[in-house]
Amino acid sequence: MRRLQNGEVFPSLDIPAVGGGTVQIPRSLRESYGVVLIYRGGWCPYCQAQLGGFQRASDKLAETGIKVIALSVDNEATTIGTIEKHKLRFPVGHSADADQVAALTGAYTNEVPRYLQSTGFLLDPDGRVLNAVYSSGPIGRLVAEDVIGMVTYLRSKS
């Protein structure tokens, strides 16, 4: 499976949103730096820590001009539980098709049960990949502080 490379435009993904509609990636991140977090599921303690970390950093992320979107294969009810548990204020998509997302992004998958492994992308304001973090298991993922540091550095160079 081919992984996305730095400089490539992130593929268009429409993932069901809690309460109806869709989370449109990368369209809804345009004109901002964007983070796309693909997480394994609400059952994963590492994913919970990552989502909670991005929520705790939300003020600093906003000040730096970074928007965050997360998604998983979890159903809507489970996703609502994850949002409520961590008081997530960024969009979280549910019921993602693991095969479709993996084919478009190169994310690793788990066979049984079927889910996406943790994958994170930092996108520029034009939707191009600046950094991709692919994990084949529970550890190894984007961290909010690293994303803030990278965008702060990039802004200082422009």
Image (spheres, helix red, strand yellow):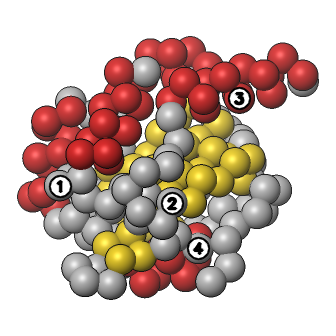
Is any atom of residue 16 visible in this view?
Answer: no
Q: Which mark is residue 43?
A: 1
**Residue density around tag 4, few if under 14, some if 14–19, many if 20 or more, within 10 Å:** some
Q: Are marks 1 and 4 in contact (CB under 8 Å)?
A: no
- Asked whether residue 59 appears in the rendered view, the answer is yes
Residue neighbourhood size for the residue with mark 1, other residues' Cα within 10 Å, grouped as few (<14), some (14–19), many (≥20): few
Question: In front of the other: label 3 or label 1?
Answer: 1
The amino acid at mark 2 is Ser
Residue 157 screen position, x and y as percent: 90, 22
Task: Please name the residue shown 25% across and 83% down the image.
Answer: 112
Q: Quadrant of the C terminus?
A: top right
Which residue position holds label 3?
A: 150
Name which residue type carries label 1. Trp
Point out the tag, 3 or 2, that comes first from the N-terminus.
Answer: 2
Of tags 3 and 2, the one toward the viewer is: 2
Q: x%, y% of residue 145?
A: 54, 24
Residue at (31, 45) in percent of width and height: 46
Is 107 placed above or below 157 here?
below
Indicate the amino acid at tag 3.
Answer: Met
Q: How far apart are the two marked residues, 4 and 3, measured between alpha carbons?
A: 23 Å
Q: Which mark is residue 106?
A: 4
Quadrant into which the N terminus falls: bottom right
Q: x, y percentage for residue 54?
A: 41, 31
69 displayed left or right of 80: right
- Mark nearer the N terminus (4 vs 2): 4
Q: Is residue 129 left or right of residue 44?
A: right
Residue visible at 21% across and 33% down in the picture: 86
